[in-house]
Image (cartoon, helix red, strand yellow):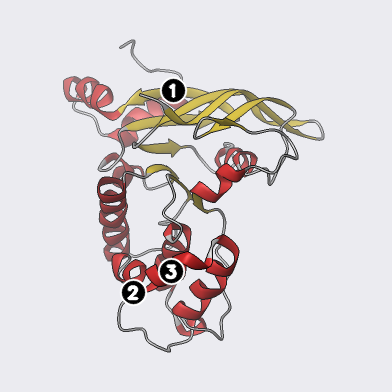
Amino acid sequence: MSNAICVENLTKQFNDKKVLDNVSMSVKTGEIYAFLGANGAGKTTLMKLLFGILLPNNGSISLLGEKIVTGGDHAVFGQIGNIIETPVFYKNLSAVGNLEIHCQYVGNEFAKDIPSMLELVGLTNVDDKKVGEFSFGMKQRLALARALIAKPKLLILDEPMNGMDPMGIQSTRNLLLKINKEMGTAILISSHIISELAKIAHTVGIIDNGKMLEERSTEEIYQELQADNLELEDYFMRVVNGGKKNA
């Protein structure tokens, strides 16, 4: 199976602090990859490097088979949707108005899909309601619609469930499963809510203090956990603490 993301020996340093230390990871085409780590572990930094928001000190990045070169103008970015950090919208415009403006950048041909995309993410009957009046969960849904409007092959999501109530978390989880299944979109998602990611991920990557500690299939992990009567949160702590049993 080909890789949607291939990162090799990636290093990023700010002044004297090494935020990413020789990190390698791969996200397979069509899979959901859960990227786990505490605050400051390096998750957001890696995602910014993927998009060229930050520049690496060393290492290589390939997205959807295309090698990303520092300062390069890569057409592949048009096939990737993302939510990194807090999404920003035009507060005085409706959901439709915000997506119409986005389509001016990614391609006006996608504007016809705005109604079906809003339906996909569960934003129906919002009509002319201004985005400034949306709840946090509604804004997250709109961010997903914006990330998906150009029908990307890859979706990169940094903490999309942060601040959501349990119903919002469950709804977002089900939506990501639907997107992955129906659109075949590969998804790289980071979150602190390990139990929720465990329900949807095919592969788990664990990063701590800028070092990639583990990259395994959830099926393989759960076979190990069953023997020890543990949950994924326990496994995460065991790996971070250096006590993972040999598979």
What is the x, y in percent for residue 167?
Answer: 27, 65
The single residue placed furthest to the bottom in the displayed view is: 128
Residue neighbourhood size for the residue with mark 3, other residues' Cα within 10 Å, grouped as few (<14), some (14–19), many (≥20): many
Quarter residue 184 falls in: top left
What is the x, y in percent for residue 235?
Answer: 33, 28
Q: Is residue 204 above or below residue 144?
A: above
Q: Which residue is mark 3?
A: 142
Determine the secondary structure under disc 1.
strand
Query: In terms of sequence position, does the residue under pointer 2 or pointer 1 come before the other?
Result: 2
Q: Quadrant of the C terminus?
A: top left
Quarter residue 153 falls in: top left
| Marks 1 and 3 close (CB-CB < 8 Å) | no
What is the x, y in percent for residue 26?
Answer: 46, 27
Q: Report whether 193 appears left or right of 94.
A: left
Q: Which residue is mark 1?
A: 214
The single residue placed furthest to the top in the displayed view is: 246
Q: Which residue is mark 2?
A: 123
As measured in the structure, the alpha-carbon distance from the residue carrying label 1 to the one carrying label 3 is 33 Å
> Which label sits in the foreground, 1 or 3?
3
Determine the secondary structure under disc 2.
loop
